[in-house]
Amino acid sequence: MKIILILLFISFSVHAQQEDALVYLVDKENVEEFINQPNTILSQRSIDRKGRHSTPIDSRDVPVNEEFITILKNKEHVQVLAKSKWMNSVYIRGDLTEIEKLKDLYFVASIEFLNKTLNQPNLEKDELPKNSVVYNVRDYNYGSALNQTQMISLESLHDRGLNGDGMHIAIMDSGFPNITENPAYSSLISEGRLLGTYDFVDRSRNVQGFGTHGSQTLSVMAGLKENEFIGTAPQASYYLFRTEFTPSENPVEEAWWVEALERADSLGIDVVNTSLGYRDFDESKYNYGYEDLDGNTTISARGANIGFEKGMLIVTSAGNDGQATFNTVATPADSPGVLSIGAVDSLGEYAAFSSMGPTVDGRIKPDVMAQGKSTAILDTNGNLDFVNGTSFSSPIIAGAAACLWEGLPSLKNSQIMDLIRESGSQYLNPSNEMGYGIPNFESTYQKGLLLKLNNDFFQDRFGIAENPVASEVVFSIPHGILHADIQFFDVLGKKILQTKITNSANRVNVSQFDSGIYIALITSGRISNSFKIIKR
């Protein structure tokens, strides 16, 4: 495959100026039919997870039109490398003049070049999202992983039997060699908890890839070596996705990353760990500057924001440029929908290589810290090793977050993220280097229990999934309620709309409303709730 790729690049080099671009497509067809039959586009686990957290299924869950992709693939001097259903776009590479011609195709809405100097100054972008149980308790001997586990008080969750059991985690990385033969993953394999693999670069199930980075990050969560090492989520189930072509650095890797994130969502993944970051590329015309790190500009940040809205908890490394002149976190660590993790040493002190914040729009990044200097891992043969990098502090937190969420399943991803931040050692005094500090998962869990009780109290009430709203209001309906009456009033008390909702049809179109404040009254039998709705 490596030889084939080299030949492809050679064959493309004989043409004119080569560029990478995102081709945005016109609106998808049959969206309503797909949404009404979500099992045709999503796994049942994904549908259940979205329902549990009141995450709407919308047009972004509908696949890209494959007919359009086929037409693009048949164009001369244009290569299709990736696609994104969330952004309704295709990542291509080809001659500049040939890419420009694509604008004339009936299904092409717009083109965004990755070389930003080729874009029109006012290029429009899609609007992006802003923002009593019996446990299986095990007696763990953490060995060399003890310090990195105790630093965040994770052993207290493990002592309660919260070890990731039932949680699905996806790891997106550069490659995972020797997984099935590595004794560190014998129980993962034998217990059927390695749920799937996919290589988005080579389009195969073989995720060998290049290097050992992916295997190392996996070991931090899933590794198990008796009396020597225990990962942070040793009983979770895992998907392994390769999204990196290590011999080169090109923004197409971000497009593969978003594809993998979309796959994770469709599979119902709970937590994603990605110890990857993008900022500098082989061709400087694609490089990101500080002004691009606003959490909404880069391909991966845009994808991460949608992934967050879809209900997943996305954890990523901050980067290792703390001692560089440009020492800001890489993307997608700048995304507000991502929990970004910096590195400390074994004493909990800031590791000088750890990238820092803030983002260009002034947000705190990294979010929290974990041990990333002399982090204990298991190598590809299952032997103990110690490594440096935020690549390894990230999976420490990702595994811990999975254990926390296992114990607080009714909470949303945003609530889990907030709880982790709020438990940070520097929450009241965050810094550019340390963010909110080192989290304490014992206190996080205790506070989460109180939040869960509050959530459970309101389970017999109606809710709304999002507010302010743009075109529709999505209502959550208590268990056992089949239908309800909805009335909308303006601020003067005048009724302007009356309709009904059901469990399967819980959306109300308000696109005809003027911008402003409205009151929604929802009633079913003796249950009645009212909400202030802000229409954008």
Image (cartoon, helix red, strand yellow):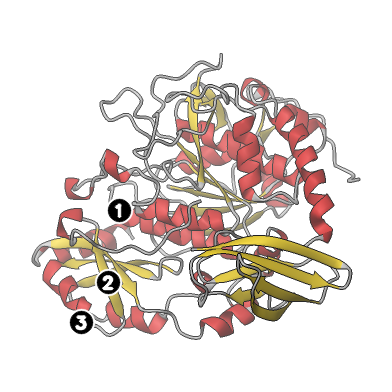
Along the line of sight, the residue nearer the viewer: 475 or 107: 475
Q: Quadrant of residue 407?
A: top right
**Residue at point 82%, 51% (across, down):** 456
Q: Residue beneath label 2, please?
A: 110
The mark lying in front, picked from 3 and 1, is 3
Give above or below for 481 relative to 374.
Answer: below
- Image location of residue 162, percent across then percent down: 77, 39
Q: Of callouts 3 and 2, which one flags the residue occurring earlier in the amino acid sequence?
A: 3
| Tag 3 near tag 1, CB within 8 Å | no
Q: Nearer the viewer, residue 496 or 460?
A: 496
The residue identified by callout 3 is 104
Q: Viewer-proximal residue, 479 or 286?
A: 479
Dot 1: within a 10 Å radius of its alpha carbon, few (fewer than 14), some, or many (20 or more) residues? many
Give percent across and percent down for residue 220: 59, 35
Specify the quadrant that holds the N terminus.
bottom left
- Reply above or below: 295 against 48: above
Q: Secondary structure at mark 3?
A: helix
Q: Earlier in the sequence, mark 3 or mark 1?
A: 3
Residue occupying the point 57% across, 71% down? 472
Circle 1 sits in a helix, a strand or a loop, which is it?
Answer: loop
In percent of width and height, residue 448 lies at: 74, 38
Q: CA distance from mark 2 to mark 1?
A: 19 Å
Residue 58 shown left or right of residue 401 in the figure: left
Q: Is residue 222 visible?
A: no
Q: Which mark is residue 251?
A: 1
In the image, taking residue 399 as reference, residue 485 lies left or right, namely: right
The amino acid pointed to by label 3 is: Asp
Counting the numbered discs, the total is 3
* Kind of residue at badge 2: Ser
